[in-house]
Image: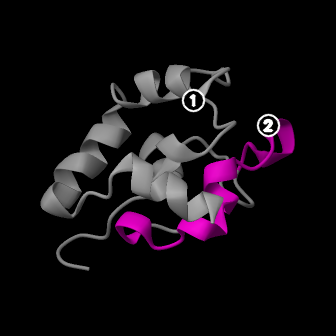
């Protein structure tokens, strides 16, 4: 990793839903924080830097009903856009990330 350590979504958003986080007792652990098949994607822990491809993650205090609804919200998200900027040409396309969790 070059420069500063890259943040996972739960660190960037300070949501408290990472394993053993402050809001896990109330809301449960976030699926992005526990999805091991994407561990290392964009140098993140589990799916912490690819949360936009994980179903049932909370966006704006609700769970989007469809992938399209979720992705439409995610492409406007400050974290998603931060990851795209940090990764530059190394940004992994959503379709490739989805394939990793389907295999």
Q: Give residue 24's position: percent from left, percent from top.
A: 78, 47
Dot 1 alpha-carbon crowd within 10 angstroms: few under 14, some 14 to 19, many 20 or more: some
Q: Secondary structure at mark 1?
A: helix
- On whether residue 62 falls in the magenta region, the answer is no
Q: Which residues are magenta?
A: 22-43
Q: In the shown orientation, is residue 27 left or right of residue 77?
A: right
- Residue 91 visible to the viewer: yes
Which one is earlier in the sequence, the residue at label 1 or at label 2? 2
Q: Marks 1 and 2: which is nearer the front?
A: 1
Disc 1 designates what residue? 67
Q: Quadrant of residue 18?
A: bottom right
Q: Residue at x 52, y 52 (%)?
A: 98
Q: Is residue 81 above or below residue 51?
A: above
Q: Residue at x 54, y 66 (%)?
A: 38
Q: In the rendered image, which quarter contains the C terminus?
A: bottom right
Disc 2 designates what residue? 27
Asked whether disc 1 touches disc 2, contact meaning CB atoms under 8 Å apart, the reply is no
Using the numbered discs, state the Cα–Cα distance from disc 1 to disc 2 in whole angstroms: 21 Å
- On whether residue 38 falls in the magenta region, the answer is yes
Q: In the shown orientation, is residue 76 left or right of residue 26?
A: left
Q: Give residue 52's position: percent from left, percent from top.
A: 49, 41
């Amino acid at each position: 990793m070059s420069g500063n350590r890259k943040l996972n979504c739960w660190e960037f958003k300070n949501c408290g839903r990472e394993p053993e986080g402050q809001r896990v007792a109330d809301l449960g652990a976030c699926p992005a924080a526990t999805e091991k098949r994407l561990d290392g994607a964009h140098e993140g822990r589990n799916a912490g830097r690819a949360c936009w491809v994980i179903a049932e993650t909370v966006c704006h205090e609700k769970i989007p009903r469809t992938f399209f609804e979720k992705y439409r919200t995610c492409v406007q998200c400050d974290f998603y856009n931060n990851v795209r900027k940090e990764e530059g040409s190394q940004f992994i396309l959503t379709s490739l990330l989805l394939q990793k969790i389907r295999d």
